[in-house]
Image: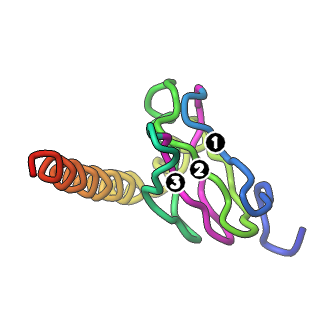
Amino acid sequence: MGAGELGRAFADGEVIIREGDVGDCMFVIQNGQAEVIIGSGTGEVQLNVLGPGAFFGEMAVFERDVRSATVRALGEARVITVDKRNFMRRVHEDPALAFRLVETMSNRIRKLTQRIAELENLCEE
């Protein structure tokens, strides 16, 4: 592990979290990229590609529930795990972190809402 590297390294295509598994922590990408995918009746649908500094799995910090998507490495990626206790400590140290998290979640909800509307329009045609 090089200087400044934390977390765990994932190989290309390796699953970091799996849709349907129960989660209790979130993740931050330190290096590399990861793709967010969901299963569909015809295979997989890619929802997003995340890069360094991006986080995912954050819903598990607020409520212990099943993962809503699979995230896997695109190329080699290094990912840091953040549990609820560490997340709350970081928010206490830097309250702006909570705002950035809510802002990112809001943007994701807006994009998903737009995508749903587009799909509904396709089905109506």
Q: Position of residue 17 (x, y in %)?
A: 63, 42
Residue 54, which numbered label?
Answer: none
Q: Give the Cα distance between marks 2 and 3.
A: 5 Å
Q: Position of residue 42 (x, y in %)?
A: 47, 43
**Residue neighbourhood size for the residue with mark 2, other residues' Cα within 10 Å, grouped as few (<14), some (14–19), many (≥20):** many
Residue that badge 3 annotates: 36
Question: Is residue 39 positioned above or below 9 on the image?
Answer: above
Would you say 120 lies left or right of 15 here?
left
Q: Give the Cα distance between marks 1 and 3.
A: 10 Å
Among all residues in the image, which is located at the extreme bottom?
3
Identify the residue at horizontal 76%, vertical 56% (top origin).
Answer: 7
Would you say 66 lies left or right of 1 here?
left
CB atoms at circles 1 and 2 under 8 Å apart?
Answer: yes
Earlier residue among tags 1 and 3: 1
Q: Which stretch appears magenta?
A: 22-39
**Badge count:** 3
Q: Quadrant of the N terminus?
A: bottom right
Residue that badge 1 annotates: 17
Q: Nearer the viewer, residue 125 or 16?
A: 125
Residue 71, which numbered label?
Answer: 2
Report helix, strand or loop for mark 2. strand
Earlier residue among tags 2 and 3: 3
Amino acid at circle 1: Ile
